[in-house]
Amino acid sequence: MFRIGQGYDVHRLTEGRRLILGGVDIPHPKGLLGHSDGDVLLHAVMDALLGAAAMGDIGKHFPDSDPAYKGADSLKLLEKVCRLLETQGYEIVNIDATLVLEQPRVACHIPQMREHIAAAAGCESERISVKASSEEGLGFTGSGEGVAAAAVALISRK
Ligand code: MG
C-alpha cells in the first residue's frame, strides 16, 4: 500500500541567526527565525512524511510552546518522525523537496542535504531529492524576507 503526503513551510530571514537548510550550516549574513533551528526544508519534509501517514503535523508532535524544542536540531526531529513512521510499519519510498529562496545560492550544498535527510530517514540518498528555485525576485522569497520549502513524500507499508 502506497501513501503520498505533501508539506509546505515558510520562515523569515533575519540577522543574528544561523542559516541551516537540510541540516547544513550555510554561511550567510542572515538566518531563519524560528522556535527550533528554523530549518524550513526539513520542516516541509517532516510535514510531508507525517501527512502521508495521516499522523498530523510537526506543530502537533513538536509544539513551539514547548521549551524542549527551543533551538532544536531539526535533523533530530526528522529522525523522530522517521522512527514514528517505522513503528507504524511504514518505509519511505522517496522524498522530493524544493527550496525557494533568492540568496544564497545553495546548489553546492544539496548533496550534503540529501545525505543528512537520508541518514535521518535510514534510507539511501538515491531516494531523497532536493532542488532549489528562485522566484525571479518576486514576492517574499524574491525580496529576501523569507525562505519557503515544499516537499512530497511517498511511503509504503512494509
Ligand atoms: Mg517551520
Image (spheres, helix red, strand yellow):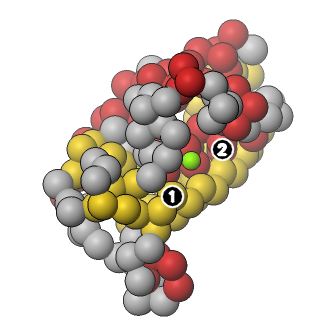
Q: Which of the image's four quarters has the C terminus?
A: top right
Taking 73 as reference, is 109 above or below it? below
Q: Is residue 68 left or right of residue 152?
A: left
Some atom of ligand 1 lies within 8 Å of the CB belonging to the residue at label 1? yes
List the residue tagged with mark 2.
Answer: 48
Image x and y of residue 8, in percent: 63, 56
Q: Residues within 10 Å of mark 2 (few under 14, many from 20)?
A: many
List the residue tagged with mark 1.
Answer: 11
Q: Residue 80 or 98: which is nearer the viewer?
A: 80
Q: Residue 142 or 46: which is nearer the viewer?
A: 142
Instruction: Name the residue type under label 2.
Output: Ala
Some atom of ligand 1 lies within 8 Å of the CB belonging to the residue at label 2? no
Q: Residue 139 or 3: which is nearer the viewer?
A: 139
Taking 46 as reference, is 86 above or below it? above
Q: Say which element carries label 1.
A: strand
Q: How many marks?
A: 2
- The answer to whether any part of residue 52 appears in the image is no
Q: Say which element carries label 2.
A: helix
Q: Is residue 86 left or right of residue 13?
A: right
Asked whether the beta carbons under mark 2 and mark 1 sit within 8 Å of each other, the answer is: no
Image x and y of residue 139, in percent: 53, 85
Asked where in the image residue 76 lies, by quadrant, the reply is: top left
Taking the spot 66% from the left edge, 44% from the top edge, the residue there is 48
- The answer to whether any part of residue 78 appears in the image is yes
Which of pointers 2 and 1 lies earlier in the amino acid sequence?
Answer: 1
Asked where in the image residue 64 lies, by quadrant, the reply is: top right
Q: Which of the image's four quarters has the N terminus?
A: top right
Instruction: Name the residue type under label 1.
Output: His
Image x and y of residue 145, in percent: 44, 73
Q: Which mark is residue 150?
A: none
Q: Residues within 10 Å of mark 1 (few under 14, many from 20)?
A: many
State how far apart marks 2 and 1 are (Cα): 17 Å
